[in-house]
Each structure stands twice: as structure tokens, then as C-alpha cells.
Amino acid sequence: MVEDLQMIYDDFKSSNAKSIEHLETELMKIRAGKATPSMLNGVMVDYYGTMTAIQQVANITTMDARTITVQPWEKSMLNEIAKGIINSNLGFAPQNNGEILLISVPPLTEERRRELVKRAKSETEHAKVAIRNNRKDSMDMVKDLKNDGLSEDSTKDAEAEIQTITNGFIKKIDDLIDVKEKEIMTI
């Protein structure tokens, strides 16, 4: 029974770690006014009939705090990459100079910053829901063990341990959103 409980804890921690990892990825997509190559993560490009991540067909760098450069490995891909960036709804209008694409990242308005904070908070809420769902699944597994003969005290201890783990992950999420909110609101 002890091994079963440990397995439940480990699975719970692993699932929650994946939720945190997903949240970090989503928060990276929310820009904070500074140009970064990761802003184009998730942009898909039609590469000879196959939808491919932009990082696999071009080199993405930043020239300065307001400009992203995209240099395709094949010049023939310039228009397809530009189309992929426009279709990704990031609000960027790439400029094609025949060699590379230049993307100017406009400064954020106060209103836009507030929208981005709302979006970030929405993402954190999704992560919290995922962790709560993981907690429910783990609690159900503990109840199944109780039905299979786990003592009442061990059941209570297991439920308390799961709640402690949950609280730790929720705190991580709160810390992540605090950092991201400061990053977005700092001019």
C-alpha cells in the first residue's frame, strides 16, 4: 500500500509539473513589450505542403529591443513565412526586404498591457484548474486504495499530503503570474 501511495504522489507531481511547464510556455507567448525570438513560437509555415514550425525553416533573432529578424534558409520561403506570421494573429506585419523579414514590435499601450495581464491571468486559471483536476484524480485513487484495505489514518494522511503538494504548485503558479504581471506592466 505504501508503494501505491508513493506512486500516486509521484504521478500527481509529474502531472502538475507538466501543467506548470505548459503555463510557462503560454506565458512566454504573451509579450511584454520587448522583442524576443520566442514571440514567434507556435507560428506554423506551409513548407512545401507540410505545416512546419517557423524555427525549422528560418533563423530567428532580435536586432534590438523592438525588432525581430527572420532569415529563412531558403529565400523562396520568404513569402510563406510572412504569410504564416500574419495568419498567427500575433498582430505583426513583417516587412520583406528580399533577404530577411523584419518585424517591428510596437510599444504597448496601457490598455493593451491590461489586456495582456488579463490573458496571462486566464492562462494561470487554466493551470490551476488542471492542478485541481489532478488533485481530484489522486484523491479518487486514494479512495480506491481505502476500499482495498488502506487504513483510515493512512487515507487521511495521504489526502493531507496531496493537498500539501497541491498548495505548493498553486503557489508556484501565483509566483509565475506575479512575475509576468510586473514584466508586462513595466514600461
Image (spheres, rainbow, N blue to C red):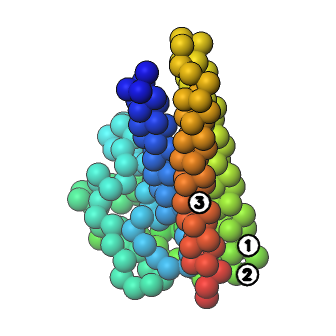
Q: The residue tagged with tag 3: helix, strand or loop?
A: helix
Residue 171: mark in rendering: 3
Q: Nearer the viewer, mark 3 or mark 2?
A: 3
Q: Which residue is mark 2?
A: 110
Q: Quadrant of the N terminus?
A: top left
Q: Which residue is mark 1?
A: 114
How crowded pointer 1 is (Cα within 10 Å; few <14, some 14-19, many 20+) is rated as some
Q: CA distance from mark 3 to mark 2?
A: 28 Å
* Residue 88 seen from this side: no
- Residue 132, percent from left and from top: 64, 40
**First along the sequence among labels 3 and 2:** 2
> In this picture, is 97 found above or below 1?
below
- Residue 125, percent from left and from top: 68, 52
Judging depth in this view, the residue of 104 and 6 nearest the camera is 6
How crowded pointer 3 is (Cα within 10 Å; few <14, some 14-19, many 20+) is rated as few
Q: Residue at x 62, y 71 (%)?
A: 178
Q: The residue tagged with tag 1: helix, strand or loop?
A: helix
